Amino acid sequence: MRGVTICSRYSAHNVTTPSQRSVWLAEIRPRAWSMYNLGGTRAAALQIYRASPVNEEVTVMDTSKVDRAKAAPNPALAQWFAGNVVFQQLVQGGGTELLAVFFETGARTRPHIHDDDQTLYFVEGQGVVATEDEIVYANAGDFVTIAAGVWHWHGAAQNAATVHISIKRPGPTNWEVEEKNWANGYR
């Protein structure tokens, strides 16, 4: 390790709370040292420190709630849904994605496949989850998990709206799959 001091103390960067110190020790200092140890200059390492978020309010716990007023359409996803659907991003990052999806009566996804398991937690109404061979109706409080690589679709029942939270690892969704029995819908 080079014998150069990038910053002698975290207090030099206005780190005053335990949560700021935690962020500084866990995230900022290692990034700056990596930059320096991989051949970067001391100035580049200092720039990481100066641009760090430690001078901002640091959140160590975030809270949110499902709120239709915070949901919005997503034009990039509209082609993959039948019916009216709006979305509220609850959590994204850190290896987990939580997305509240509000389906109007009869609205549903088109068939798709995920690279990782997807768990749906139904918050209100009655929903439906279907694979090529099975259809499950879910009510508020129910969890349904679809295994990675399984063709499926989900949404609201024909006669009820629903809200579910999609819980999965961030990653691609394969929407370019055969429709199979999707057109028959709810059987």
Image: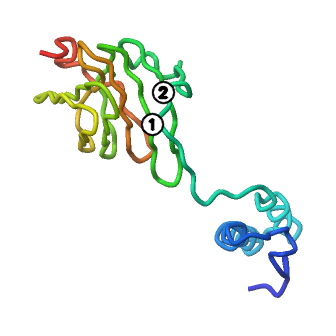
Q: Which residue is mark 1?
A: 99
Q: Residue 176: where, in percent of width, then height? A: 34, 24
Kindly identify the residue that appears in the image at 34 percent across and 43 percent down: 115
Q: Residue 178: where, in percent of width, then height? A: 25, 21
Whether residue 117 is situated above or below residue 29 in the rendered picture:
above
Kindly identify the residue that appears in the image at 82 percent across and 87 percent down: 3
Q: Quadrant of residue 166?
A: top left
Which of the two labelled residues, at mark 2 and mark 1, occupies the earlier sequence position? Answer: 2
Q: Residue 101: where, in percent of width, then height? A: 41, 28
Q: Which residue is mark 2?
A: 87
> Helix, strand or loop at disc 1?
strand
Answer left or right for 79 relative to 56. left
Q: Quadrant of residue 16?
A: bottom right
Whether residue 82 is situated above or below residue 148 in the rendered picture:
above
Amino acid at pointer 2: Phe
Crowding at mark 1 (Cα within 10 Å: few <14, some 14-19, many 20+): many
Q: Residue 183: where, in percent of width, then height? A: 21, 12
